Image (cartoon, helix red, strand yellow):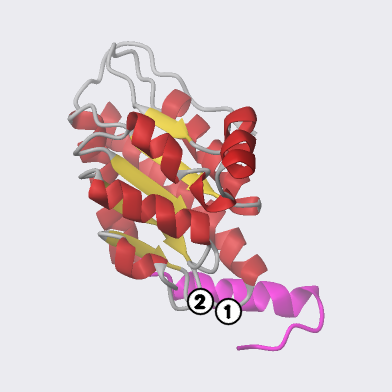
Amino acid sequence: MLPISNCRSYFDLLSATLASLPFEQVEEVTNLLVRAYEHQRTVFVFGNGGSAALASHFACDLGKGTVNGSSKRFRVMALTDNVPLMTAWANDSHYDDIFAEQLVNFAVPGDVAFAISGSGNSPNVLKALDTAKRSGCITTGLTGFSGGGMRMLCDSCIVVPADNMQIIEDLHVCVAHSLFTCVRASIAQPSTSGPKLVSRTA
């Protein structure tokens, strides 16, 4: 790992890590999301802290930014958005249940569970992935370091090759935007007519 002593060294490390991203895995997850759209499966996105913010952001991009004039919409839900429900499960059951119990309500075979965790070891994320697999869902997501426990629970997992959490989170945003952009392009390809809405989400 390159030492970070100033802003330039931070961006040097970011650039070096960017060059080492597992681009084949990113393409694989892109195709997985396109298939989910084509077969009208629901994608459930979840994570903690900064990853929770990215889960909501990614769901917004996929849900609105892929609208291209077709009546067919991308079915996506961020499990991070219902704060009363999350706190109810955390208070009345266990914090590890806040995502898994939501999946019990909604997930059906063929749906996609998309986890985001910098460490890959967040207990509530791992429990949700295990619940998703038991429900017949496809499991995928974004992580860092060596993938943690999440790697073994994902059918397809994008691991940012870094051990600095800020670098990992920076590149998780980049990967999420690349997934969204490529999914949107794939969805738009079959139809060259009609209005297309471009995402302007900040």
Element type at marker 2?
loop
Instruction: Name the residue carrying label 2.
Output: 145
Quarter of the rendering containing residue 33: top left
Q: Residues within 10 Å of mark 1 (few under 14, many from 20)?
A: some
The kind of residue tagged 2 is Phe
Q: Residues within 10 Å of mark 2 (few under 14, many from 20)?
A: some
Instruction: Name the residue carrying label 1.
Output: 163
Q: Which residues are the magenta region?
A: 1-22
- Up-down relation of residue 198 to residue 94 (above or below): above
Q: Residue at x 39, y 31 (%)?
A: 76
The N terminus sits in image quarter: bottom right
Quarter of the rendering containing residue 101: top left
Q: Left of 6 or right of it: where is 69?
A: left
x%, y% of residue 30?
30, 48
- Up-down relation of residue 112 to residue 168 (above or below): above
Q: Residue at x 24, y 49 (%)?
A: 134
Q: Nearer the viewer, residue 22 or 147?
A: 147
Element type at marker 1?
loop
Tell which circle, 1 or 2, labels the residue nearer the N-terminal end: 2
Q: Residue at x 47, y 55 (%)?
A: 125
